[in-house]
Image (cartoon, helix red, strand yellow):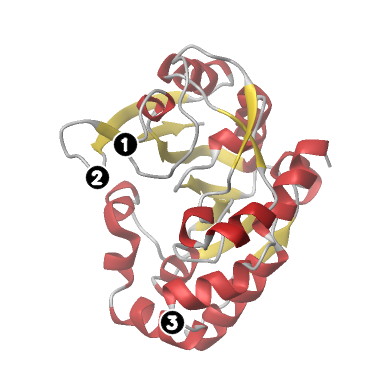
Amino acid sequence: MKDYSYQNKKAWEYNAYDFWVSHSGTPAQRAKKDMEDPVGMLKRYADYFDTYEGVRVANICGSCGKKAVPLAILGAEVTIFDISEDNKRYALETAKEANVNINFEVCDVLEIDLEKYGEYFDVVFMEGGVLHYFHDIDEFMRIMYHLLKDNGKLICSDFHPFTKIADVLKLEQNTMDYFSTDVFEGEMAHARFFDEETRKRMPKCSYRKYTISEIINSIIGNGFTLRRFDEHPAWSNKEVPGEFTAVAVK
């Protein structure tokens, strides 16, 4: 595991289970919402899935299972790859309460066992701010490509690169030169929900933010055929971009 992955793992295992309980409800409460409206719980990402039943989905950095469990309820075979044991605990407890099974591999995404999972999945799916945790986007996209079967689909939804220069998502993270290639330390995404003393104790994450062209060129350069690239407004200001979704096929 890379040094910066260890650093990010420490951050994402700092009171993570308790955080999910306080912000998303107990696993039983979360599962109830997922079962009542699984498509609704997927939000805009439901538009990018052609079908669910029997589809093998790799949920990259799937966190607490907030999208994996609804996908499983809809009939998908879901494997989460995530670095946090706390996230695994919450996700598996929620899946159990929802009467579905999900697989959860606690690992550095860059070290996924390709002998086991190579060309295994129909869909590789990620959302909620993933790319900035990886310092080499080409290495990341190469692994995504090898996880997919031929004709498999990549659904990559992430924070819009506009967030490099403006905190439009109110994440209280560093802003910088749009074209900067610097690696920097910053608070993990949920730090802003804690009191100041707790925030001071929380381990930092190591980030590398990318431009639109770096993201698109990495997708294309690693063998994918880009099908669409959608930009979505920021939740704090509908007049500026906050997120994007890239859809590509192998």
User: SS for tag 3?
Assistant: helix
Q: Which residue is label 1 attached to?
A: 168
Q: Which residue is drawn at 52% across and 48% down?
A: 122
The N terminus lies in quadrant: top right
Q: Which of marks 3 and 2 is nearer the N terminus?
A: 3
Q: Which residue is label 3 attached to?
A: 31
Instruction: Give the class, few, some or many, for how many residues have Cα within 10 Å of label 1's Cα (few <14, many ≥20).
Output: many
Q: Which of marks 1 and 3 is in front?
A: 1
Residue 82: tell me if it is visible: no
Residue 53: tell me if it is visible: yes
Q: Which residue is label 2 attached to?
A: 236
Q: Which of marks 1 and 2 is nearer the N terminus?
A: 1
Amino acid of disc 2 = Ser
Q: Are marks 1 and 2 in contact (CB under 8 Å)?
A: yes
Left or right: residue 7 versus residue 217 is right
Q: How far apart are marks 3 and 2 (CA)?
A: 27 Å
Q: How far apart are marks 1 and 2 (CA)?
A: 6 Å
User: Which residue is most to the top?
Assistant: 179
Q: Which residue is drawn at 58% across and 45% down?
A: 187
Percent x, y of residue 142: 65, 28
Percent x, y of residue 28: 47, 88
